[in-house]
Image: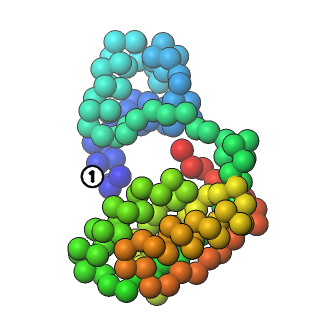
Amino acid sequence: MTEPELSQLDAFDQRILEALSADGRMSITDLSARVGLSRTPCQARLKRLVDEGYIRGFRAQLDPVKLGLDHIAFTEVKLSDTTEASLSAFNAAVRRLREVEECHMIAGPFDYLLKVRTRDIRRYRQVLGEKISALPCVASTSTYVVMESVKDDAP
């Protein structure tokens, strides 16, 4: 959020966002008690925060390790063409890869940084060779394998 957007939120709104970011399953009764509002005004504020896009949704946060997806690699991607059409094609295609957990366009010596989660290095190598390298306009990639996640606040 930019500063002007944050300044439009009062202390109650900010407490609602903070409480829900810690526990998105909190009941409206618990939320209203936590932020110091009665249930109806709290519910109205929550609806407004959702409608205005401050809250994009609610979802279960899965444990990737328990799901056997504890191999993380960061992949730098350099494109052969960075026209708007090429960027759009790459963006659309990378969104369809379930192994790519995050994708960021970067200002620097490469174009994109991907966070890729797989079950092991063999599967990562397969995803890199068959999926990532086949994305539109990919010229080269570099991989950095995570040895340990020290801080991971992913929603």
Q: Report the residue at 51% width, 37% height from top.
A: 21
Residue 28 quadrant = top left
Q: Amino acid at mark 1?
A: Pro
* SS for callout 1: helix
Q: Report the residue at 38% width, 63% height from top.
A: 93
Q: Nearer the viewer, residue 129 or 9?
A: 129
Q: Nearer the viewer, residue 140 or 134?
A: 134
Q: Nearer the viewer, residue 19 or 77?
A: 77
Task: Locate residue 61, reporting x and y percent.
Answer: 58, 38
Is residue 131 placed above or below 110 in the rendered structure?
above
Is residue 117 placed above or below 135 in the rendered structure?
above
Is residue 47 visible from the viewing direction of this image? yes
Q: Nearer the viewer, residue 121 or 6?
A: 121
Disc 1 marks which residue? Answer: 4
Q: Report the residue at 28% width, 68% height from top.
A: 88
Q: Report the residue at 47% width, 57% height from top.
A: 97
